[in-house]
Amino acid sequence: MSPRAIAILILVVVVGFIGTMASVQYFVRDPLPIIGANQMLHKRTRAMDPPIALQIALDGAYRVDVQLQHPGNTPPEVSLRPTEGRAIPLEVQSTSETHMVANGQLTRPGRWDLTVSLPGVSETFQFIARE
């Protein structure tokens, strides 16, 4: 094989690799956030107006703390469940007119769905609890 053919082959392989790596964003649009022990995740609703700010925090024993900052007219309902599973019990407390906290114990690591509902509209946030 001539040096010119080898150089062209190497160029095609390098450009192909760069093209593959650059196109990953077209295949993986919105990856799920991953939270581990002693970490937090901040989200904001899109389907609700005005939006509700969320903070999901896990401690070392996988106790979950969900804080919601809402507009104050009607407090939202919160449900947390593993994907394809039953909802876990949450202890919900209103700390002020526009702030509420929901506490619970995650039963396992893996994919979880947090659903925030107001009358007529709900939004689900998915995340992965890491071991």
Image (cartoon, rainbow, N blue to C red):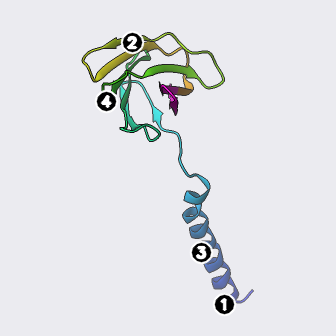
* Disc 3/disc 1 C-alpha distance (Å): 16 Å
The first of marks 1 and 4 along the sequence is: 1
Q: Residues within 10 Å of mark 4 (few under 14, many from 20)?
A: some
Label 4 with label 2: CB-CB less than 8 Å? no
For label 3, the residue is 15
Q: Residues within 10 Å of mark 1 (few under 14, many from 20)?
A: few
Residue 38, horizontal then vertical, whole percent: 36, 25
Q: Residue at x 37, y 22 (%)?
A: 74
* Disc 3/disc 2 C-alpha distance (Å): 54 Å
- Mark drawn on residue 92: 2
The nearer-to-camera label among 3 and 2 is: 2
Q: Nearer the viewer, residue 97 or 22?
A: 97
Q: Amino acid at mark 4?
A: Pro
The first of marks 3 and 1 along the sequence is: 1
Residue 31, horizontal then vertical, whole percent: 53, 45
The first of marks 4 and 3 along the sequence is: 3
* Disc 1/disc 4 C-alpha distance (Å): 67 Å
| Secondary structure state at the residue bearing disc 4 | loop
Q: Amino acid at mark 3?
A: Val
- Mark drawn on residue 71: 4
Q: Amino acid at mark 2?
A: Val
Label 1 with label 4: CB-CB less than 8 Å? no
| Secondary structure state at the residue bearing disc 3 | helix
Which contiguous range is marked in magenta?
114-131
| Secondary structure state at the residue bearing disc 2 | strand
* Disc 4/disc 3 C-alpha distance (Å): 51 Å
For label 1, the residue is 4
Q: Nearer the viewer, residue 69 or 81?
A: 69
* Disc 1/disc 2 C-alpha distance (Å): 70 Å
Q: Is residue 12 magenta?
A: no
| Secondary structure state at the residue bearing disc 1 | helix
